[in-house]
């Protein structure tokens, strides 16, 4: 089972992708006299990571409440309620932190297993994620 740190770092890697040009400009400090040519096609932000599944948080429930995915897949949880919610593993291996209305979090899972989770703010809200 992956550690909480591994899962969080994956989520962050997937969520933050600066264009290479922006990184180069920051690293170099000064702007080059001649800007580099624009890439002919966009570079994917992240390598292919399997399928992306969606779980809505709405009506104080996870929809769907149970989801089965393959190792390497990604789940995007989106809070469609006005109230804040979290996506928190019961065993502590992942935790979205507080998701405000309209916010989403993306998590990728590589270790097979069954991961019951809940909303830490409203613990009656429960869901199950199965990887395998
Ligand atoms: Cu909640």
Image (cartoon, rainbow, N blue to C red):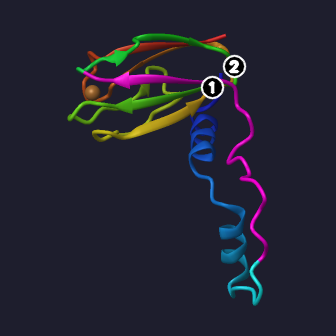
Q: Quadrant of the C terminus?
A: top right
Q: Give whichever of 7, 14 is nearer the camera.
A: 14
Label 2: which residue? 71
At label 1, counting other C-alpha atoms closer than 10 Å, the crowd grade (few under 14, some 14-19, many 20 or more) is many
In this rendering, position of residue 108 left or right of residue 60:
right
Q: Quadrant of the N terminus?
A: top right
Label 1: which residue? 109
Count of marks, rendered view: 2
- Name the residue rendered at 77%, 86% in the picture: 34
Q: Where 81 sits versus 127, above or below?
A: below
Pointers 1 and 2 in contact (CB under 8 A)?
yes
Q: Is 51 inside the magenta-drawn segment?
A: yes
Residue 2 is drawn in which quadrant?
top right
- Name the residue rendered at 55%, 32% in the picture: 107
Looking at the magenta stretch, what is its main secondary structure?
Answer: loop
Q: Give whichever of 66, 25 is nearer the camera.
A: 25
């Amino acid at each position: 089972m992956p550690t909480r740190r591994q899962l969080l770092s994956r989520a962050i890697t997937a969520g933050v992708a600066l264009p290479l040009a922006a990184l180069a400009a920051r690293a170099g400090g000064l702007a080059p006299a001649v800007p580099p040519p624009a890439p002919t096609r966009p570079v994917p932000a992240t390598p292919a990571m399997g399928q992306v599944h969606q779980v809505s948080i709405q009506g104080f429930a996870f929809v769907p409440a149970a989801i089965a995915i393959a190792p390497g897949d990604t789940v995007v949880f989106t809070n469609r309620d006005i109230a804040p919610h979290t996506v928190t593993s019961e065993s502590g291996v992942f935790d979205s932190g507080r998701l405000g209305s309209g916010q989403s979090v993306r998590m990728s899972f590589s270790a097979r297993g069954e991961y019951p989770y809940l909303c830490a703010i409203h613990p009656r809200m429960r869901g199950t994620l199965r990887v395998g």
